[in-house]
Amino acid sequence: MNTEAYLNRIGYSGSREPTLATLKVLQRAHLLHVPFENLDIHQRQEIRIDVERFYDKIVGHKRGGFCFEVNGLFNELLKNLGFSTHFITCSVFFQPKQQFTPYFGHVAIVVHLEEPWLVDVGFGTNFPEPLRLSAEDHQHQDDTYYQLVKLNEVETLLRRTTDQQEYIKMYKFKPEPHLLTDFAGMCRYHQTSPESPFTQGKLCSLLTPDGRITLTDKNFIETIDGKKNETPVENYRDFDQKLKKYFGIAL
């Protein structure tokens, strides 16, 4: 992997020392430049657990990806810069059914500094900077509060506030280390199962300096300072035009 090219892809030119300050800026830079997207699934392009393929797609072709791709590659960058990391398995809370999905359906990263930090550049409504794993009090980032709550001896729940200042569940996770290849089964599931949220429709979403932009088959949603503006997507040509205009992606 060409570390220099990767850093250029995410617009990062700061310190490369493996410190918390560096980690915070790296995560935010990644989220501002690399979208969370499932477009290959709808192009019938197989996604395999392969960091070289992730690099070619995200850096070489200036695309994004879903959690296995973007967190898989971001972890590689962190290791190249001298950070100590490991992957963890997560169980996402599926809001429409109000239930948790199976473990290994989402992968996140733990970075070991003087204390452990939760890092994730592959969740749709993401926290922009790492979260302190040892704290159960509220952690404030960009007008949103996040909280880590111990459910039992092995599971921790991540929550964030809504506009009404009520906490909603994001996902729960277990602390033990895993290899990225441990997620291969769920990576296939998310591409092929009619029950997977990723097979339901196209999605591309990106953090912006003052909010977020999200494109689906039905709507383009621009959120600025907490206020949402939705524009309908008329047809597949309109989708492709918006994808190119706002995300720089041409399929």
Image (cartoon, helix red, strand yellow):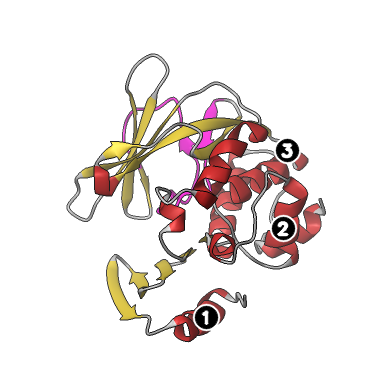
Expressed as whole percent of the image width and height from the top left, the position of residue 182 reads 62, 31
Q: Is residue 137 magenta?
A: yes
Q: Which residue position holds label 1? A: 240
Closer-to-camera residue (222/187): 187
- Residue lying at 55% horizontally and 74% vertically, measured from the top left: 247
> Which quadrant holds the C terminus?
bottom right
Closer-to-camera residue (86/138): 86
Q: Which residue position holds label 3? A: 79
Magenta span of residues: 115-139
What separation in Å lies between label 1 and label 3 (alpha carbons)? 35 Å
Expressed as whole percent of the image width and height from the top left, the position of residue 243 reads 52, 77
- Residue lying at 30% horizontally and 76% vertically, measured from the top left: 230
What separation in Å lies between label 2 and label 1 (alpha carbons)? 27 Å
Q: Circle 3 sits in a helix, a strand or a loop, which is it?
A: helix
Q: Is residue 88 magenta?
A: no
Q: Amino acid at mark 3?
A: Lys
Label 1: how many Cα within 10 Å (few below 14, some 14–19, many 20+) = some
Q: Which residue position holds label 2? A: 7
Q: Amino acid at mark 2?
A: Leu
Q: Amino acid at mark 1?
A: Asp
Residue 75 vs 112, above or below: the answer is below
Residue 17 vs 227, above or below: the answer is above
- Specify the quadrant of the image occupied by residue 224: bottom left
Instruction: Say whether marks 2 and 3 touch (CB < 8 Å).
Output: no
